[in-house]
Amino acid sequence: MNGGYGVGIGWRPDIAGYVAGLPGLRFTEVVAESLPRRGAAPAPLDELRQRGVTIVPHGVKLSLGGAEPVSAERVAHLARCAELVGAPLVSEHIAFVRAGGREAGHLLPLPRTADAVEAVVANVSRTQAQLPVPLALEPIAALFDWPDAQLTEADFLTEILDRTGALLLLDVANVYANARNRGEDPFDLVDRLPLERIGYVHVAGGAEHGGLYHDTHTDPTPPQVLQLLAAVCDRVTPPAVMLERDGRYPAAADLTAELDSIASAARQEPVTARPEPVMEPVR
Amino acid sequence: MTVVAASGDTWGISGPQFLQIYLVLAVAALVTALVWRALATRGTDPGGYRPPGPVELAYLAGGRRLAVQAALAGLRCAGAVGPGPTKRTVVAVTAMPPGLGELERALHAAAATAQTIAGLSADARVRYALDRIAEALVDAGLLLSAGHRRAARLGALFVLGTAAFGVVRIAAGIANAKSVGFLVFATIVVLVVGLRLLTVRVTSRAGRRLLRKARSVNAYLRPNLSPSWATYGVSGAILGVALYGTSAWWAADPAFATHAGIAAATSSGSGYSGGGNSCSSSSSCSGGSSCSSSSSCSGGSSCGGGSSGCGG
């Protein structure tokens, strides 16, 4: 993806009408597992595509960080999704969601070890071999770290990206959550990440419970995350920046205000208003 | 075998010959009846009339019952009504929010004390508001007036007359000791078609066209997408119930829907057939021709007069 997609929002059925009504929208993302295994894409997505909106399938269940090889069937579905919506790239998480055949139901973090790097690289390479488009990898928000980490988060990530040639799907809310829960400085972490490899950027809301910051996707984006987004956009211009909202959807006006703040932090045009009409010269 | 009139034939016409004449007559009667009916039920496209609002669309799609349920969805979305203290009751929990229509205001006023939805619907002011909506829809040519529906039903007389003619011939045939099996069968078919033509939908064809258009424009409110009422706002909530029936309620607010006793599926076909007291089992969608052609019909069983979807 090269530049110019501006600010987007994740497509969810619950707010499909709102997303379709965004006049300046050029970018959206759809959860790959929500797309049908066979048959056409949902009509609202097709309509967006016909409008010229770029749609990126976002996988959540591939389990790239699992010790076992990725399921060929799941990779085939991700590849099919890319073709179904004409995506220029697809994305997945650096995480595992199942082990020994048991589903965790969550994205779980990997131990930051050389062995884990090998496992992820092997799975990413298998996946890339079957995908018709590039793959972007998203580091997750983790509420805990495995002990005995051999690598820093930045080094772990850079190593995986270097060895696989994958793009970075940078979730600034995850960076914020991880740094805050570890008592680190999120701006420091951003500085050590390979920002030049960003495929696109996620932004999401969260809330604090019991002293920990949870990346809920069901609360508004806090100002600290927007500041972090601004810091990233000071350093590079990401091809696209996108709000992930997955539940407890607010009023349309609140979503609009949130998208506008994201556009402002990312120094992008707002997508919520129609562009100024070109005035015909008066004769 | 060559059929010739024999002296023993009833009315001097042989059975097979009469059957042929009768079938031609029946087809002619049916065509006449259908043309008559089509002319009487076409309604008018609301040219100068302002486009109907969401509550009016609900009335158009499912009559008084759906209009009340849709208006309640607006009040619920605005946070103005909540579950009442006892099962199946609804109660106003805040002051009336601004910007809502007459029916919503009437329902909110009636819900000052907890009531069932049936109780709310029986409130005098609510009934008056519903009457006003119906009048406006009739004036706009989207609902058929009682007179138009009577006129449309008259078309059935062509077919019922043919059935009566068949009965007379059967009687004569039996009196003449002739076999009448085929004619009995044909007459029964004609009779059933004639009775079927007595059912006339309240919604005019223009009204059904408008509903189809509204459903295609607002497809994002389809219950299977679990549309967010918070995001789409009060008019989105009302419109969702109007266009897709009470399954929209269940997708958005199942807890309240359960408490208030809102049926899971009501009419979401193109127009309703009830109205007044004619909630008969032979609802307009049972024939299948009118509903199956409409792609927006959600779910096979929820067309027209389902178990709970009758307008009356």
Image (cartoon, helix red, strand yellow):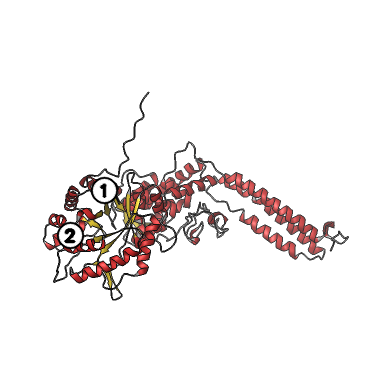
Q: Position of residue B210 (x, y in %)?
A: 49, 46
- The residue tagged 1 is A259
Q: Quadrant of residue A109?
A: bottom left
Q: Is residue A204 visible?
A: no
Q: Within 10 Å of the Cα at label 2, are there few (<14), some (14-19), or many (20+) other Cα atoms? A: many
Q: Within 10 Å of the Cα at label 1, are there few (<14), some (14-19), or many (20+) other Cα atoms? A: many
Vertical side of A204 occupied by A265: above or below: above
Viewer-proximal residue, A22 or B227? A22
Relative to B41, A130 lies left or right: left
- The residue tagged 2 is A177
**In the structure shown, which secondary structural element does the residue marked by tag 2 occupy?**
helix
Vertical side of B50 occupied by A199: above or below: below
> Which chain hosts label 1?
A
Q: Residue at x 39, y 61 (%)?
A: A80
Kindly identify the amino acid type of the residue bearing the numbered disc 1: Leu
Q: Quadrant of the C terminus of chain A?
A: top left
Q: Residue at x 45, y 47 (%)?
A: B214
> Which chain hosts label 2?
A
